[in-house]
Image: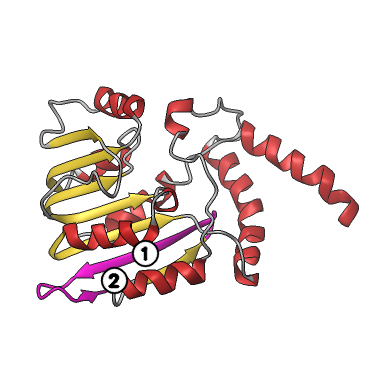
Amino acid sequence: MTSLLPRLLPALDRFNAAHPWDHNAHFHPWILRQLPRRFGSALDVGSGSGDLVRLLATRAVTVHGVDADPAIVALARELTPAANTTGVTFTVADAPSGIPGGSYDVITCVAVLHHLPLADALAAFRDHLAPGGTLVVVGLARQQTPVDHLLAAVSAPLNAATGWLKNRGRTSPAPRPLAMTAVTRPADTGFPTLVREARRILPGARLRRRLFWRYTLVWRQRPHGDGDVRM
């Protein structure tokens, strides 16, 4: 069995490359389920090509996307029709220091937090979240514990099966390079550390390991400033 692994893993990589799918977009419907039906303002940190921003715009009055990559911000603007998405803006900025001032009813951050200084980013999200607002993070953590490795082992065949189904069994070209710029570095912080730091800065935050090498964090700012959970 062990001797099969060196041949099996490259074959699985080739299969996944031929049947690609967007792991982050997979969580977009789940993100929307954590949010109110309507809200005033939203901020998406690390907005990439703007897919989540455009979804948030179906519920929000204004949505602001920030990303450090000028090329992908330009792509997001190109892909966002002004006639159908009034109130949507994109800005080139480094997070957390470059987060636009003011407060937001919703803040989202997908597959970006592991690129940022963890404590500073979480504190900035907290400080920019309006009373009663909701923070939703989908992130990547370093595999350290037996549970991490078990979920990764389960995710591997499910990833291949999902790619096969989403592509209807056909091979598909890989996503354009610009859409992949957000995933440039593996996570170096383990999930237990993430939980401790998040709950220190965001009391009451709920974090869960997920399939497909992701975790989720949900936190709601109470009107008096304390944290509570909205699931």
Q: Which amino acid does label 1 sit on?
A: Leu
Disc number lying in front (2 or 1): 2
- Residue 36 lies, in percent from the top left, at 18, 60
Residue ID at (24%, 38%): 54
Q: Looking at the image, is 201 positioned above or below residue 130?
A: below
**Going 61% across and 28% down the picture, which residue do you hit?**
171
Q: Residues within 10 Å of mark 1 (few under 14, many from 20)?
A: many
Residue 2: quadrant of the picture? bottom right
Q: What stretch is highlighted in magenta?
A: 211-231
Q: Which mark is residue 217?
A: 1
Query: Does the residue at mark 2 contact the one at mark 1 (Cβ under 8 Å)?
Result: yes
Q: Mark 2 = which residue? A: 202
Report if residue 221 lies within the magenta region. yes
Counting residues from the start of the chain, the first of labels 2 and 1 encountered is 2
**Mark 2–mark 1 distance (CA, rounded to whole Å):** 10 Å
Spot occupied by residue 128 in the image (x, y as percentages of width and height): 17, 57
Is 20 on the left-hand or right-hand side of 13? left
Instruction: Give the SS element for disc 1.
Output: strand
